[in-house]
């Protein structure tokens, strides 16, 4: 992912110092961590760090009072949800609780079952080739093994082999069918789901070139996702124009994953927003300046929140230094109880310590 940081540069800028501060944050009530006899001052509960500067838009909404300096509400004709903004950061909008619990569960399921399906590419594609039905394989406890490609064997038999087809491919088999000696080259489908870091929808983003590769096969963004994005983009759209969802990047965050500070600059028209949906565990999002030297503003993103970044806000560094997986901090009880009755206990298990972000873009 972006922002692979040079350790020597780790603390050189205000953005990196903030990333480090929140990455290292430890909640005060983690069992077994509060016993230390020589607690440093200011960490009474045994925690490390401080979240007092993190903007909490849900708390502001619930308090329904005067807003802190620098934070405003955006009133937008034809959009009936509360929308917050920063007065000195035009183009950034925060829609707290934009999705109902049912909608959150629907998009969590889609993110795991449908979004990683070919022709969409994922971080696993470069290693294993195209993998179909990863989620079903995980549910059925299948194993991914490397086998001879039957197409190549057949070609060799016809004595005209040597084309571009891979001689080995990966496929799912039953655990009982894994041959002796093959175990070391095999991976459980469940482990692979946990290794998902991103998938790309619509026009495929090529991470190596950091650009969209329009020659790659792709499906259009599905109608339900496109209509959600169009509706939610309204507060950030130039008046009279409609957002065209052409691509999306889905990020999957495990317990210690982060997304380093970056700017998304591969889309042609920056007056159009990126529509960014949060699902699963709570995280800290940093919104910085046009360079990493500006001190970023930290805010909580929770499941169901939507952020819009358009215009000037698109030039700002941003990232996710930390997600909260501790059961008293993850704040996904509504999603957990909704998913508890479900046959896919796998989804519940996954989301309890993961965060998913779907960010939808107009490319042209
Ligand atoms: C991105 C991004 C933010 C998030 O993928 O470009 O900024 O909330 N994601 O995960
Ligand atoms: Mn981004």
Image (cartoon, grey):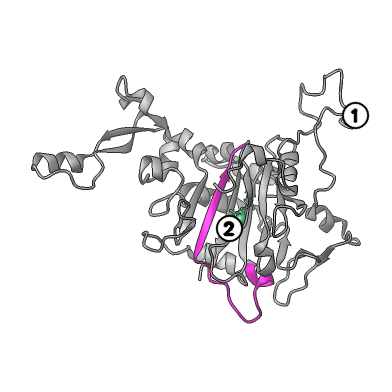
- Residue shown at 74% from the left, 43% from the top: 17
Q: Secondary structure at mark 2?
A: strand
> Considering depth in this image, is 194 or 25 the residue closer to the camera?
25
Classify mark 2: residues with Cα within 10 Å, few (<14), some (14-19) or many (20+). many
In the rendered image, which residue does mark 2 sit on?
359
Q: Secondary structure at mark 1?
A: loop
Q: Is mark 2 within 8 Å of ligand 1?
A: yes
Q: Which mark is residue 306?
A: none
Task: Say which quarter of the image contains residue 242.
Answer: bottom right
Task: Say which quarter of the image contains residue 340.
Answer: top right
> Considering depth in this image, is 224 or 261 the residue closer to the camera?
261
Does 143 lie within the magenta span?
no
Q: CA distance from mark 2 to mark 1?
A: 40 Å
In the rendered image, which residue does mark 1 sit on?
41
Classify mark 1: residues with Cα within 10 Å, few (<14), some (14-19) or many (20+). few
- Residue shown at 81% from the left, 36% from the top: 49
Which quadrant contains ligand 2?
A: bottom right
Q: Is residue 353 above or below residue 179?
A: below
| Highlighted magenta segment, given as a residue range | 233-255
- Residue shown at 42% from the left, 51% from the top: 121
Q: Is residue 236 above or below residue 285?
A: below
Q: Give how far across and how far down residue 24 sits, in percent.
A: 73, 35
Tell me which label, 2 or 1, sits earlier in the chain. Answer: 1
Q: Give how far across and how far down residue 178 sits, in percent.
A: 32, 25
């Amino acid at each position: 992912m972006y922002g692979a940081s040079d350790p020597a540069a780790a603390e050189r800028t205000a953005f990196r110092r903030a990333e480090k501060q929140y990455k290292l944050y430890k909640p005060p009530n983690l069992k077994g961590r509060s016993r230390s006899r020589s607690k440093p001052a200011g960490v009474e509960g045994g925690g490390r760090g401080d979240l007092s500067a993190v903007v909490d838009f849900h708390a502001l909404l619930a308090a329904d009072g005067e807003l802190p300096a620098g934070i405003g509400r955006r009133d937008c004709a034809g959009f009936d949800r509360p929308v917050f903004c920063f007065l000195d950061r035009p183009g950034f909008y925060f829609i707290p609780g934009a999705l109902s619990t049912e909608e959150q569960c629907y998009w969590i399921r889609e993110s795991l079952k449908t979004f990683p399906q070919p022709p969409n590419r994922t971080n696993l594609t470069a290693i294993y080739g195209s993998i179909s039905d990863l989620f079903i394989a995980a549910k059925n406890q299948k194993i991914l093994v490397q086998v001879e490609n039957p197409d190549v064997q057949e070609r060799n038999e016809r004595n005209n082999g040597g084309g571009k087809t891979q001689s080995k491919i990966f496929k799912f088999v039953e655990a009982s069918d894994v041959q002796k000696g093959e175990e070391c080259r095999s991976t459980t489908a469940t482990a692979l789901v946990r290794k998902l870091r991103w998938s790309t929808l619509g026009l495929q983003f090529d991470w190596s070139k950091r650009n969209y590769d329009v020659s790659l096969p792709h499906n259009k963004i599905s109608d339900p996702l496109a209509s959600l994005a169009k509706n939610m983009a309204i507060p950030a759209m130039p008046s009279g124009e409609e957002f065209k969802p052409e691509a999306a990047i889905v990020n999957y965050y495990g317990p210690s994953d982060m997304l380093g500070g970056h700017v998304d600059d591969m889309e042609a028209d920056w007056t159009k927003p990126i529509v960014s949906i949060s699902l699963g565990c709570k995280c800290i999002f940093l919104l910085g300046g046009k360079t990493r030297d500006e001190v970023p503003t930290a805010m909580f993103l929770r499941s169901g929140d939507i952020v819009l970044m358009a215009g000037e806000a698109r030039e700002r560094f941003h990232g996710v230094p930390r997600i909260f997986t501790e059961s008293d901090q993850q704040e996904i009880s509504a999603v957990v109880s909704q998913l508890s009755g479900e046959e896919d206990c796998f989804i519940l298990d996954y989301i309890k310590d993961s965060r998913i972000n779907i960010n939808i873009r107009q490319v042209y």
